[in-house]
Amino acid sequence: MQNNLVKTFAWLFVFSVAMGFMESAVVVYLRKIYYPGGFDFPLAPIDFNIAITEILREAATLIMLISAGIIAGRTKTEKFGFFVFCFGIWDIFYYVFLKLLIGWPVSLLTWDILFLIPTTWVGPVLGPIINSLTMIMLAVLISRFTNSGYQAKFERMEWLLLVSGSLVIISSYIEDYLQYILQHYNFGQLFHFSENEKLLDYAVHYIPVSFSWWLFVLGEAVLFVAIARFYFRNKKARGTKPNV
């Protein structure tokens, strides 16, 4: 059983690294076209159809990572664990390959566009790398319990903490961008790009001003509380039940 788990993690690792290269390759092409002098804010104007394609590409990437977790996992909890493992490896190696291919980012504090769903996320590269390492740790703990014959599960409170911590972290990524956009548009207009190309034209002039590290750290702290609770509770429960 241990050998099978190692093989599963190994192949998921290979898959996620390959996904990371594919993602970085697309970005290399886009930056060659739109940022021949090197990527920086404000953003270069891009065709509306390209912007929509990028959003759909990100959605497709998430679907692929989720699918890998579903295929590899033995329980619902482990399927979730393998998904976040793939996500973490993919995101880290996305930056690794960008550094190798084009020498970017310059540092871990370099600003980047992190995601476009449901709105634009921006932040220092260090942020998503820390998030990715947290995901990987959680995935390993889940599979450690499941592989021992004890089917670990999240309790409602742990799910609440995981979701709450994630939302706080997302808030840290979108806060600065939303403050810029909401100077001229209402919140509802953010989700109607197909009907409001002017918003996209306005958005490309955005330059990051500040990142809410305190929100980010708070979100990470909540995640660690959830992970610690999950670990100690399941460790205690496993110790009182025979392996199957």
Image: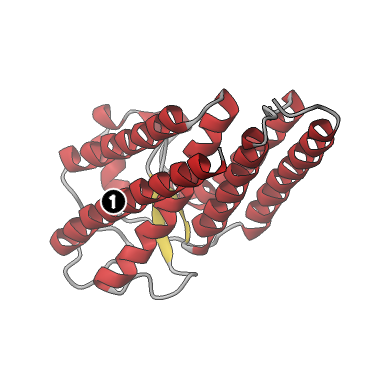
Q: Quadrant of the C terminus?
A: top right
Q: Where's residue 11, x and y in %?
A: 38, 45
Q: What colour scheme has been applied to the protein in the rendered image?
A: secondary structure
Classify residue 76 by image quadrant.
top right
- Report the front residue among 68 and 134: 68
Q: Which residue is found at the position 26% from the left and 39% from the top?
A: 198
Q: Where's residue 161, x and y in %?
A: 71, 35
**Residue 123 visible to an observer of this rendering:** yes
- Report the front residue among 184 and 33: 33
Q: Residues within 10 Å of mark 1 (few under 14, many from 20)?
A: many
Which amino acid is tagged 1? Glu
Report which residue position mark 1 lands on: 23
Q: Where's residue 211, x and y in %?
A: 56, 59
8 vs 230, left or right, is left
Q: Quadrant of the N terminus?
A: top right
158 vs 123, left or right, is right
